[in-house]
Image (cartoon, grey):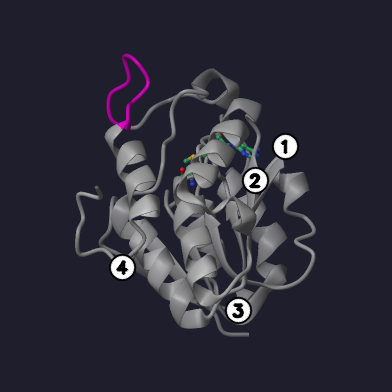
């Protein structure tokens, strides 16, 4: 059973998969605090998944928006995908477009979605999200810009938000998990069409609304 009995998801099958993934959380061996890996293929066993408070907020906001099309960078083993897919299913149908560069994680996410009964509500695109999210096939209601560290250059979160922001509907939300400084500079610049706040969830979760 889900150890968060007052969460918004009512389906025990979905909650059981979320609880199992939460229970399996692990850091890479030898890491302390923020992990310093860069090659995503070296971390095929670790989910680095969003926290339940973030997932539950995604679920509530997507229900409130009556969302039918959403996207995420990235999918990993599918924790965030489960919250999105549950909301779309409970809204009457839709698709979460996922992205993941590690093939084993794509397979794990699909297994987890199948176990939760949600596989019909997700399309996981394997490859580099900077390519696979370039064309979402139409406007989306919500985007999760999770992240992955990089040695140098702009963060992946910054590169991805520049690709996906034009594909988000006005009135749609973006959630960011890792507070990359160049991502925050983009999303907080009024010229880019968002209003934004930092929620006291995890180390600071940025939630932004597209207003124009
Ligand atoms: C923080 S995890 C995502 C966690 C996921 N949202 C969840 O809740 O389970 C980041 C993921 O990004 C993937 N990744 C790293 N670089 C990528 C890229 N360029 N394109 C797509 N996925 C990438 C990693 O393999 C990793 O699984």
Mark earlier in primary sequence (4, 2)? 4
Image-quadrant location for residue 165: bottom right
Kindly identify which residue carries mark 2.
Answer: 99
Mark earlier in primary sequence (2, 1)? 2
Quarter of the picture holding the C terminus: bottom right
Kindly identify which residue carries mark 4.
Answer: 8
> Magenta residues, as a range?
24-33
Q: Nearer the viewer, residue 193 or 5?
A: 5
Contact flag, marks 2 and 1 (Cβ < 8 Å): yes
* Tag nearer the camera, 3 or 4: 4
CB of mark 2 near ligand 1 (< 8 Å): yes
CA distance separating discs 3 and 4: 30 Å
Kindly identify which residue carries mark 1.
Answer: 127
At 42% across and 52% down in the image, what residue appears? Answer: 177
SS category of the residue bearing label 4: loop
- The label on residue 193 is 3
Chief SS of the magenta region:
loop
Q: Nearer the viewer, residue 185 or 66?
A: 66
Q: Ligand 1 is located in which of the four quadrants?
A: top right
Instruction: Let me know if residue 107 appears in the view.
Output: yes
């Amino acid at each position: 059973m889900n150890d968060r009995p007052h969460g918004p998801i009512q389906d025990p099958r979905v909650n059981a998969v979320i609880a199992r993934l939460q229970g399996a959380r692990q850091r890479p061996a030898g890491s302390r605090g923020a992990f310093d890996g860069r090659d995503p293929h070296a971390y095929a066993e670790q989910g680095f998944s969003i926290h339940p408070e973030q997932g539950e907020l995604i679920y509530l906001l997507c229900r409130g928006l009556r969302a039918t099309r959403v996207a995420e960078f990235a999918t990993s083993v599918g924790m965030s995908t489960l919250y999105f897919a549950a909301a779309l299913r409970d809204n009457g149908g839709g698709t979460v477009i996922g992205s993941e560069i590690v093939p084993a994680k794509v397979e794990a996410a699909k297994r987890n979605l199948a176990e939760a009964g949600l596989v019909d509500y997700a399309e996981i695109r394997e490859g580099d999200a900077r390519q696979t999210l370039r064309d979402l096939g139409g406007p989306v209601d919500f985007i999760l810009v999770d992240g992955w560290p990089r040695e140098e250059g702009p963060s992946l979160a910054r590169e991805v938000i520049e690709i996906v922001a034009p594909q988000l509907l006005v009135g749609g939300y973006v959630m960011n998990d890792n507070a990359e400084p160049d991502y925050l500079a983009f999303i907080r610049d009024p010229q880019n069409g968002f209003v934004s706040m930092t929620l006291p969830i995890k180390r600071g979760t940025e939630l932004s609304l597209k207003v124009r």
